[in-house]
Image (tube, rainbow, N blue to C red):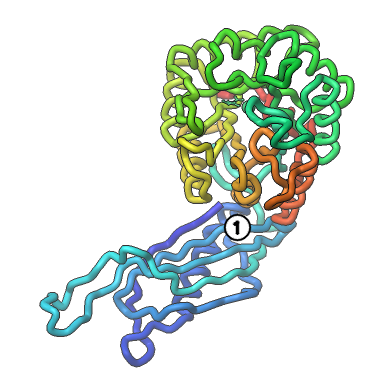
Amino acid sequence: MHSVIRLRMSRAHYGGNLVDGAQILELFGDVATELCIRADGDEGLFRAYDSVEFLAPVYAGDFIEARGEIVGWGRTSLKMRFTAHKVIAPLFEVGAGYAPSSAELLREPVLVCKASGTCVVPNEFRRKARPGERIGRPEPCIVTAAIVGAETTREQNPHLPITPAELAEEAARCAQAGASVIHLHVRDDHGGASQERERFRAAIRAIRARTDVIVQVSTGGAVGMSIEERCGGLALHGSDAPEMATLNVGTINFGDDIFVNKRQDTMEVARRIAAAGLQPEVEIYDLGHLDIAAELIEKGFLHLPLHVQFVLGVRGALSASRRNLELLVERLHDLDRPGSRSTWGVAGIGRHQFPLAEAAAELGGNIRVGLEDNIFLEKGVLAQGSAPLVEKAVALAQRTGRTIATVAEARARLLAAATV
Ligand code: KMH
Ligand code: ZN
């Protein structure tokens, strides 16, 4: 959750046209107020700054962009981080041929101040959102474990689970660590990517014998598979059926390969997911994929609220930055209609897994981690399976004040019937 204010500084206080730092703190105060209103429906009170750094001079006439975000969710408190950048400056050079009214848009905004602090909204002042109103605190964080994928190999990480028994063991360890959804691929006897129905059946049976997590089958499979092949997991019925399935809506470069998702094929997979009565999770690798999702909603292949996974940092698709994530979240909610609030998670690829998990926790989203996306617990240290990655993600999310969704909470949120 973030807020931005852009304002021209008009009151010089010191010699040389300098603005006093208190004016920047005034902007941060307004940013904090908006964040309190967004989170708790009340203006709240600023309790304390724990750090303020003034890093560059600000002059009357400068345009300052103050930005703040909530980075910790206490019971009544909200921990916030702020930055102020100079984005426009007047041009003062005498005799340089500029009109006195000349100004420049700075090519690189200048960081003039950063700060962090805590605001409080007493419980009795917090109010619930009215229907359709976009305020409120984030729900418990749903952690998905992508325990195997189609690309990771045993050579890259010897802890990769492959057989049904290994997949079940890993799923149970991940559930124990806080995961409530298992994103599932299956492998053949040689460890190669497979999407065969019977292999899914065996894996799902083994997993369900150990834990009651939500099983989400991949319909992405591996690059080069036919759509028919990719849909193997959708052909299971009754107690062997999964509860969710992924839906890939856009074609992307995928490292040196191309992950092909043609429009008609996407519609066909969406149709099959709906026919199987499963909840789709829309995989979004790039900004334009949300436009495709919008078309699928319009044509009736998807229904609001959506549940999407932002998969960021695939080489050939959108990079894994916090700014990109914020834009995606904003655009996702633009698709919402009164009464529907789409849910989202983020899967950062490789070294982006934990920075994006932390960003997701702070922004109110959900997290996906696991060996499918990243094989390292930290730089140079291989993860001993996906469970340690789940543990680390859970700790990160809890540090921001988020609670972790139980399987029952995840089921209630993700598998709720479409409302619009
Ligand atoms: N293995 C990737 C090419 C999904 O599971 O839906 C696609 C993938 C997406 O993993
Ligand atoms: Zn996958």
Examine the rendering and report whether any part of residue 292 can be seen: yes
Where is residue 50? Give x, y as percent: 65, 74
- In the figure, is residue 169 to the left or right of 69? right
Q: Amino acid at mark 1?
A: Ile
Image quadrant in which the C terminus is located: top right
Q: Seen from this angle, which residue lies furthest front?
A: 155
Ligand 2 is in which quadrant of the figure?
top right
Along the line of sight, the residue nearer the viewer: 418 or 156: 156
User: On the image, numbered disc 1 is attached to which residue?
Assistant: 70
Crowd band around label 1 with a 10 angstrom C-alpha radius: few (<14), some (14–19), many (20+): many
- In the figure, is residue 102 to the left or right of 309? left
Disc 1 element: strand
Q: Seen from this angle, which residue lies furthest bottom?
A: 15
Q: Quadrant of residue 74?
A: bottom right
- 386 above or below 53? above
- In the figure, is residue 33 to the left or right of 192? left
Along the line of sight, the residue nearer the viewer: 90 or 235: 235
Examine the rendering and report whether any part of residue 337 can be seen: no
Q: Seen from this angle, which residue lies furthest right?
A: 209
- 300 above or below 137? above
Q: Residue at x 60, y 42 (%)?
A: 348
Q: Residue at x 46, y 45 (%)?
A: 327
- In the figure, is residue 419 to the left or right of 336? right
Q: Quadrant of residue 344?
A: top right
- 308 above or below 95? above
- Figure label count: 1
Where is residue 90? Give x, y as percent: 25, 74
Where is residue 386? Give x, y as percent: 76, 37
Q: Residue at x 82, y 34 (%)?
A: 175
Q: Residue at x 69, y 24 (%)?
A: 415
